[in-house]
Image (tube, rainbow, N blue to C red):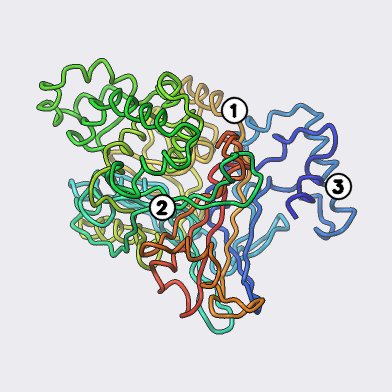
């Protein structure tokens, strides 16, 4: 299917960039989910692509439809139209959505229809101190903390579920319910007070989150030739003391081309970032910001600063790209690729990830009793915990309320207009947790030098590629070729030491981890949380960490 898709949307001479899925609708795409079942395996797969022209009305599987799509893409590429500019100018929500709500009054575009997605028509007029658009982690964090510190706050969510990318959907097959994650899967430090900003939020709101823990990440890599030949083998990155049996240094000695060099270079990287790393314990990551307010929000770190004055020399590194420091100190290929895989937890390879991310890894991942966490019942329970915490302080969460416009007066945001026409006023601030591309469209025809500069900047950003998500349900007890799931060596390796639900599959360890066709992650939450599927079954979420 993927090969056929690439052929259809990328005919000879066309621009692949012209047909990739744009950021403007990534948020809604991430929320899309579907299901199907079979006797052996239930598979749900979605490939997000750019919204199709309303004129392409032929059945999707027909030769005519495929030919027209190819012509449309080729025509867009040849016309030279800047798609980045177009996505900042388009204001029709129905145009950019990749699916139709099941209760929409009128459908202008022919798109798949998904039950239970609402119509975005809820919400009432009112006045608040702070109006937050979107109930992702950022929106819920802003809304709940604003409420705790005395502001009358409302969070407006277009979907019928909160959480943004921290979103769970369910499907029923053969009488059993299977739950799948569509967002982040691997979390560290949610089991107890830690440096994890999510855990800090939960504690600040006096909330609880039930989790199961594990202490390692599985890697599936080629043989020692590192060239994708021969059988794939398994190794495990173990959290905690790197010198301990089975620890990180033991893995480097066994798998790196030059294990001792890799260890020396890793220690050199740790020394280089030691002072900055120590600062993460002196000031919360929640307090980091990239403007002058940095001085006020990090004032609590003064005791650390007075004993480590050299931290000022390294402050520019905090928000700089990690690859600059790595390039100076690390040459061993295995170690460089390992660092890249650690950076995928923030969504980027080392070239693009802030150094602050690696500071967290250095400070936390190698501490005794450090553990990854699986939220019991799914990651949407993180969102529920933040929502409960905010509601205790009076925060209102309104679902199925699509914001159609941000209202401006004298150059200042003073409220929003909802899809149903209701106006919600904001005395202090309007905060958008939507993407920059969605946010700039909500400003409609507003005109100012700063806004025009923002639109121009967004138009120059590279377009985001599509991401494939594969959701699979496995029958662990069924015999296939005389074997159950537990009879396979690979499965036993995957769940050893109390269960490791998180794994990375590398096609060629010698290729860059930034190569979207080289790295894939899969997560098996049912290894630690059996509540997500019936007994004797497992659920698996497979996806590449980077766009395709």
Left or right: 118 as drawn, with respect to 241: right
Label 2: how many Cα within 10 Å (few below 14, some 14–19, many 20+):
some
Say whether marks 1 and 2 touch (CB < 8 Å): no
Q: Secondary structure at mark 3?
A: helix
Residue at the location (52% across, 48% down)? Answer: 27
Q: Nearer the viewer, residue 548 or 129?
A: 548
Q: Which mark is residue 327?
A: none
- Quarter placement of the N terminus: bottom right
Label 3 belongs to which residue? 68
Q: Nearer the viewer, residue 127 or 322?
A: 322
Left or right: 304 as drawn, with respect to 507: left
Label 1 belongs to which residue? 459
Dot placed on the residue nearer the N-terminal end, 1 or 2: 2
Label 2 belongs to which residue? 186
Q: Nearer the viewer, residue 331 or 60?
A: 331
Q: Secondary structure at mark 1?
A: helix
| Gap between marks 3 and 2 measured at Cα | 41 Å
- Quarter placement of the C terminus: top right
Q: Secondary structure at mark 2?
A: loop
């Amino acid at each position: 299917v993927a090969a056929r898709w690439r052929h259809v949307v990328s005919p000879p001479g066309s621009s692949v960039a012209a047909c990739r899925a744009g950021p403007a609708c990534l948020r809604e795409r991430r929320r899309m989910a579907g299901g199907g079942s079979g006797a052996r395996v239930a598979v749900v797969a979605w490939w997000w692509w750019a919204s199709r022209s309303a004129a392409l009305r032929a059945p999707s599987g027909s030769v005519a439809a495929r030919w027209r799509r190819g012509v449309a893409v080729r025509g867009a590429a040849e016309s030279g139209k800047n798609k980045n500019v177009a996505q900042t100018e388009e204001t029709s929500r129905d145009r950019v959505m990749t699916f139709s709500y099941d209760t929409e009054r009128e459908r202008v575009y022919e798109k798949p229809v998904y039950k239970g997605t609402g119509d975005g028509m809820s919400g009432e007029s009112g006045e608040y101190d702070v109006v937050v658009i979107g109930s992702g982690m950022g929106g819920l964090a802003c809304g709940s903390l604003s409420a705790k510190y005395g502001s009358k706050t409302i969070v407006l969510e277009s979907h019928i579920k909160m959480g943004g990318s921290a979103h769970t959907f369910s499907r029923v097959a053969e009488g059993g319910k299977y739950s799948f994650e569509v967002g982040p899967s691997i979390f560290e430090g949610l089991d107890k007070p830690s440096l994890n900003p999510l855990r800090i939020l939960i504690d600040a709101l006096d909330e609880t989150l039930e989790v199961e823990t594990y202490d390692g990440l599985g890697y599936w890599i080629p043989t020692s030739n590192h060239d994708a030949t021969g059988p794939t083998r398994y190794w495990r990155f173990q959290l905690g003391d790197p010198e301990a049996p089975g620890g990180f240094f033991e893995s480097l000695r066994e798998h790196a081309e030059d294990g001792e060099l890799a260890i020396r270079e890793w220690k050199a990287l740790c020394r280089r970032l030691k002072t900055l790393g120590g600062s993460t314990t002196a000031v919360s990551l929640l307090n980091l910001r990239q403007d002058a307010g940095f001085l006020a929000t990090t004032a609590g770190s003064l005791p650390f600063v007075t004993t480590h004055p050299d931290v000022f020399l390294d402050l520019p590194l905090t928000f700089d790209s990690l690859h600059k420091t790595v390039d100076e100190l690390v040459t061993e290929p295995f170690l460089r690729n390992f660092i890249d895989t650690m950076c995928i937890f923030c969504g980027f390879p080392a070239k693009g990830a802030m150094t602050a991310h690696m500071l967290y890894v250095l400070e936390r991942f190698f501490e005794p009793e450090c553990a990854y966490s699986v939220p019991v019942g799914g990651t949407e329970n993180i969102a529920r915990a933040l929502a409960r915490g905010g509601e205790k302080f009076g925060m209102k969460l309104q679902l199925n309320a699509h914001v159609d416009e941000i209202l401006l007066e004298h150059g200042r945001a003073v409220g929003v207009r909802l899809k149903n026409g209701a106006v919600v006023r904001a005395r202090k601030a309007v905060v958008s947790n939507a993407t920059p591309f969605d946010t700039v469209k909500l400003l409609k025809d507003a005109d100012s030098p700063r806004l025009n500069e923002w639109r121009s900047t967004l138009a120059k950003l590279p377009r985001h590629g599509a991401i494939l998500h594969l959701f699979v349900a496995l029958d662990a007890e069924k015999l296939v070729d005389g074997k159950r799931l537990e009879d396979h060596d690979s499965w036993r390796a995957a769940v050893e030491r109390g269960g490791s639900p998180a794994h990375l599959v590398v096609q060629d360890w010698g290729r860059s981890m930034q190569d979207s066709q080289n790295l894939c992650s899969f997560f098996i939450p049912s290894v630690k949380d059996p509540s997500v599927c019936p007994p004797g079954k497992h659920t698996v979420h497979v996806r590449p960490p980077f766009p395709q």
